Image (spheres, coloured by chain):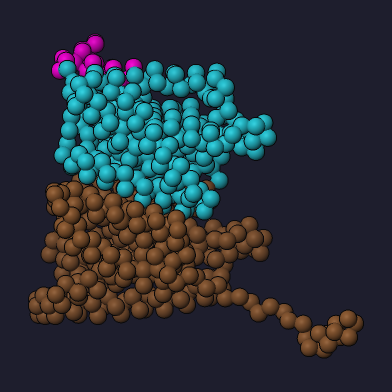
Amino acid sequence: MEVLQLIVNGLMAGTILAVPAIGLTAIFAVLRFTNFALASHMTIGAFAGFVANVTFGLPAVAALGFAFVIAGLVGVLSDEFVLKPFRRAGFITTAIGSIALTIALENIVRFIFGNQLRGYDLPILRDWNIHGIRVSPQQVENFVVAVIVMAALFAFLSFTRVGKSMRAVADNPMLAAIKGINANVVARLVSFVAMGLAGLGGMLIGLDTTIDPLIGFKTILQIFAAAVVGGLGSIPGAVVGALVVGVGEELSLLVLTPAYRTAVGFIAILVVLTFRPRGILGQRAY
Amino acid sequence: MEHYLVAMGVTAGIYAMMALGMNVIWGKAGLINLGLVGFFAVGAYTSGLLTLRLGWPIPLGIAAGTLVASLVGVLVAMITVRLRGDYLAIVTLGFAETMRIVMSNELWIANGTDGLSGIPGPFRQALGPHLFNLQFLGIVTAATVILFFLVERLVNSPFGRVLRGIRDDEQVVQVAGKNVVTFKIKAFAFGTAALGLAGALYGHFTSFIAPDLFAPLLTLYVKLSLLAGGLGNSIGAVVGAVLVVFFLESTRFIIPLVPGISAVQGAALRELLIAVALLVVLRFYARGLVPESIPQPPLPTAPPEAAVAIERVR
């Protein structure tokens, strides 16, 4: 029973983790760099949602929308003015630039909100008990939101013209350019959607616990693990990877103390890179 | 005041050593290491634990710290070196964070978040605090100078030339029959050894290390040192480290002058300033104060007779 409970928890946590992991992998697929600034955009989303929820008194679901939009807008601006010029200078410069950017943005949040832990304004509900498996209604709500967002994203990428052009650029930028797809517009769109997802994910994680300016940086390793395990650059891969990491972290509780949950992600990265660098669903890793 | 300047000098020396190590990894071989603070921590903890718990002599502890950091560097490099650079970025960052988690949680190894205190320093009791710091400034300066010449020797050797080749065009180096993977791993081993050495010295200087000291911000300081001074250049690395320590310390005095902000806001402002400084330098000033000078092979000049012959034809 205990194992079953852990698996349920892991699937719930993994589904939430998948949201920012999709953002990371989408940026990698289209813009071809690992954006470490994802961490601060999760923090920005979590705090934007906090303002909407606690200061303006909106319900959590509406606040999630707010988190998506604000983080997405910051993502477009920061990419346009900070990261885009770096991309021409090569990936080391871009990676270091994105780390510096994430620390800068995180500290802007810290300057405004301070370091203390904060919680969202949520109704207190009793946990449900289904055949001995305990789940909280908030967990279920987060899970459902994450699933709906991902379904919407898949529909957007598969059926809309804009979504298809995003996939085209990811697949073959040269061919996409020949067909008249404006790479700049696609880049901005990807930044918006991906960082929006990061912000949404940041708030979803915060809804489960508490938030502080480090919330993004503390989870970034798990998100990288999810993306790498699934195959960097593959969106379905990010989902699969997130579920693997989520369940793996919970099952690790059988043998390790909770503090090591994050280390599990790192071990997963090492194992995957050693034996199957392109991940479960990725194309290639060199 | 003098006290403060001496401590600043030691910090500058330690940053300079890290910058020199990173210069081999990043500046010469063109490899990324976003978790350099993790290797610094490995050096500090290894030497600290061996001298404190097992009573090893300090020089032996420092040597062990250097060696262990280098071995870990080799492991990290071996896993990712064949893959795209992004993976090395992720793994190094993940390594540093995991190190911090392990050190924060394992009470039995390193006392958790409370950290290790009472790490012995050479003749700390006999000299008293002031003379001890002066002596340590001497030790760190000597170590930096030695490391400086080692790095210079290394990068000007055929080995260094291959590293530059890998940085500038890996395929050409491969075509020339060099084993790129081994060269990359060796560069990483050397660089992380320097990071470990800096960490070990740091621990013996301050006598106290804790997981919080090994935050990602330190990684930015070293990158900033390297960029400000001039990437790929040993003198630049040292000059940059001194500049960065000066800049960091000056923010300590400037921030309290900003009216109406709390301590947390001040700290946030300081970190913001440092991150923005790195972004600005990276964007607009990436060649640094002392740009890398690449020795040019002598160009074949036409011998005088030929020139005369050409002249005649004309």
| Magenta residues (range) | A124-144
Residue A179 in the image, given as x and y percentages of width and height: 67, 31
Residue A253 in the image, given as x and y percentages of width and height: 25, 33
User: Which of B126/B17 is in front?
Assistant: B17
Residue at image coords 65%, 32%: A180
User: Which of B294/B136 is in front?
Assistant: B294
> Which of the chains is cyan?
A
Residue A97 in the image, given as x and y percentages of width and height: 41, 51
Residue at image coords 37%, 56%: B278
Q: Reply yes or no: does residue A136 show up in magenta.
A: yes
Q: Reply yes or no: does residue A226 show up in magenta.
A: no
Residue A125 shown left or right of residue A250 in the figure: left
Q: What is chain B's hue in the picture?
A: brown
Instruction: Locate the N terminus of chain A by quadrant.
Output: top left
- Residue A162 appears in the rendering: yes
Residue at image coords 19%, 80%: B135
Residue at image coords 34%, 40%: A39
Q: Residue furthest top?
A: A131
Q: Residue furthest front?
A: B259
Residue B263 shown left or right of residue B174 in the figure: left
Q: Quadrant of residue A74?
A: top left
User: Which of A164/B161 is in front?
Assistant: A164
Is residue A261 placed above or below A162 in the rendered structure? below
Is residue A30 placed above or below A6 in the rendered structure? below
Residue A178 in the image, given as x and y percentages of width and height: 68, 35
Residue A281 shown left or right of residue A125 in the figure: right
